[in-house]
Amino acid sequence: MAMAVGVIGGGAWGTALAMHAARGGHPTTLWARETEVVDSINQERENKVFLEGYKVPDNMKATSNLSECLAQSQLVLMVVPTQFVKGVMAGIAGEIREDHIFVCCAKGIHTETLETVNEIMESVMPESVHHRFAYLSGPSFAKDVAEGCYTAVTVAAKDESVAKQVQEQLSTPRFRCYRSTDVVGVELGGALKNVLAIACGICDGLKFGDNARAALITRGLSEITRLAVAKGANPLTLGGLSGMGDLVLTCTGDLSRNRTVGIKIGQGQKLSEILASTNTVAEGVYTCRAAYNLAKKENVDVPMIEGIFKILNEDADPEEVVHKCMTRELKEEVAKEVMDAAAEAAMEANG
């Protein structure tokens, strides 16, 4: 039976997911803070502010009343930037019903607390509802989903029955969901790839070449995996859709906001000018600082993430950052802690 879906967040990604849910037969209510988004969807049947040119289905509506959105939905998709998740969730904590399932679709790490979205949600919501939290991640540009292009993503939840329920509700012949119980791995893969996408954009903006981009993606995945393992993730998760899949898309796709920021930096533009010229959010700019500080906290070596942090925040020269990475002490390709974690995961899988 199709659940009624609520979507909290009226940006491009929230709108695309709402369109997908509605096309899948779910009565869908989207909440947006911006009244112009609500009016545009309800009156002109498209989000002309953040996703212009894509007509929304008849069974989708928008509201600026968050309580109304919650009251009319059972499956709730959280699609607000990571830095605002805590405030939104704290505001609705008293309105959660026993049949609500929350699916967080934001990708990032809180810049001050270094919390993942799962940790943020669990810190502000009653423990009795923690088992009904799920997380959606994977290679999925908003415009492709809005167009109905073939897409595959991962849904993770600590309770596998919840992951399966969300998987079944959101999967269609054009949008396939795989499930996982590795919430940490799925979340960090989705968050950290945005930082590497900025790096790839800088690489392309400076015309470093295809070899450099391939090396950056691969070694970037190694850094993501090391940091995720330090936080308790299964390293094999990072080889899946929410890790390698999302990383490749965001580092190479022309629709990537984070890669676009990097390209402009590589071409000589200042970060402040780039951010002032757009109404969309490039999460990697904010996640970069959090990732750098989280790696220091966990004592994980992340030279590429460190380099991007210094380019964005200390005006470091990209050529010098690359030279420093390339002339470091020579070492093995796969870190011992990752090998050990992979072996442990294989043993658990085999009983």
Image (tube, helix red, strand yellow):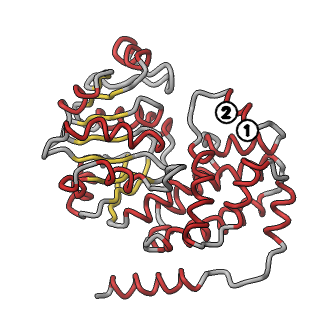
Please give the name of the residue rendered at 49% of the width and 53% of the height, measured from the top-left corner: 113
Q: CA distance from mark 1 to mark 2?
A: 6 Å
In the image, is 320 to the left or to the right of 69?
Answer: right
Element at badge 1? Answer: helix
In the image, is 259 to the left or to the right of 162?
Answer: right
- 230 vs 188: above or below: below
Please give the name of the residue rendered at 56% of the width and 62% of the height, measured from the top-left corner: 294
- 339 vs 150: above or below: below
In the image, is 194 to the left or to the right of 330?
Answer: left
Q: Amino acid at mark 2?
A: Leu
Label 2 sits on residue: 275
Count residues near mark 2 (Cα–Cα under 10 Å), then give few for <14, some for 14-19, many for 20+.
some
Residue 317 image point, x, y percent: 85, 52
Count residues near mark 1 (Cα–Cα under 10 Å), then give few for <14, some for 14-19, many for 20+.
some
Please give the name of the residue rendered at 46% of the width and 31% of the height, measured from the top-left corner: 11
Answer yes or no: do the residues labelled 1 and 2 have beta carbons within 8 Å? Answer: yes
Element at badge 2? Answer: helix
Query: Residue 271, which numbered label?
Result: 1
In the foreground, 38 or 241: 38
In the foreground, 209 or 302: 302
